[in-house]
Image (cartoon, rainbow, N blue to C red):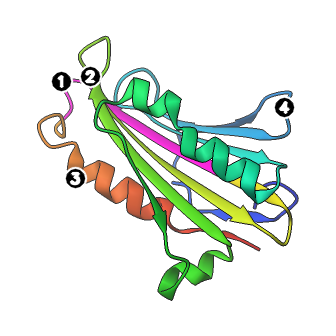
Amino acid sequence: MLFDKRLHSQIFDNDYHILGMKDDPTFLTYMCGGGTNAFSASYRIHSLDREKFINQVEKKDFYDKRYSNWVQYDLPVSGVLKLANADQIVVGFGSRLDEFGDKEGEAVLFLYSDKYQQGYEITWMMNFSKGNVFFDNPERIWTYMSEVLLFTWID
């Protein structure tokens, strides 16, 4: 439970993860591993009205510059996605080779709650060095990562 017990998210449980919060109470980070073959997650809360939050989400300049194949979708809040208790859901994906030749993939989930007048941004990133068994097929893990990301909900 994060941000006044309003945001719930599934994260991996293991002996080598680090969960940390900086001086900014609107930003939380989680890291497994380090350097290459690492997984990180960051959680942000935005106290904005829905229009301002969605305008910020739709700009996506950062992702377009970082990933040439960035895609972003506004998901219908219906079916199983109603369980997220969000009034608007946007998800984005992208991958690339980083400056060290490692494969990097990122999935971002944006949720907005009219009830709390807050937006939530959850970013999951994973990279693979050439020594990783998934280097030739990282999509298998990135797909899993993006599916798990949807196990996030607002209370």
At mark 4, the secondary structure is loop
Query: Which quadrant of the figure contains the N terminus?
Result: bottom right
Residue 130: assigned label: 1
Question: Could you tell me how far apart the alpha carbons at marks 3 and 2 are, in whole angstroms?
Answer: 16 Å
Could you tell me the amino acid type at mark 3? Answer: Arg
Q: Nearer the viewer, mark 2 or mark 1?
A: 2
Query: Which quadrant of the figure contains the C terminus?
Result: bottom right
Q: Is residue 70 left or right of residue 86?
A: left
The picture quadrant where one finds residue 70 is top left
Q: Nearer the viewer, mark 4 or mark 1?
A: 4
Disc on the earlier residue, 4 or 3: 4
The picture quadrant where one finds residue 4 is bottom right
At mark 1, the secondary structure is loop
User: Is 96 situated above or below 84?
Assistant: above
- What are the residue bounds of the magenta stretch? 121-132
Q: Residue at the spot x=53%, y=59% of the render?
A: 90
Q: In the depicted view, which residue is nearer to us: 7 or 73? A: 73
Residue 52 position within the rendered picture, expressed as x and y whole percent measured from the top left: 75, 48
Disc on the earlier residue, 2 or 4: 4
Residue 115 position within the rendered picture, expressed as x and y whole percent measured from the top left: 84, 72
Disc on the earlier residue, 3 or 1: 1
Disc on the earlier residue, 3 or 2: 2
Q: Is residue 12 left or right of residue 140?
A: right
Residue 24: assigned label: 4
Residue 102: assigned label: 2
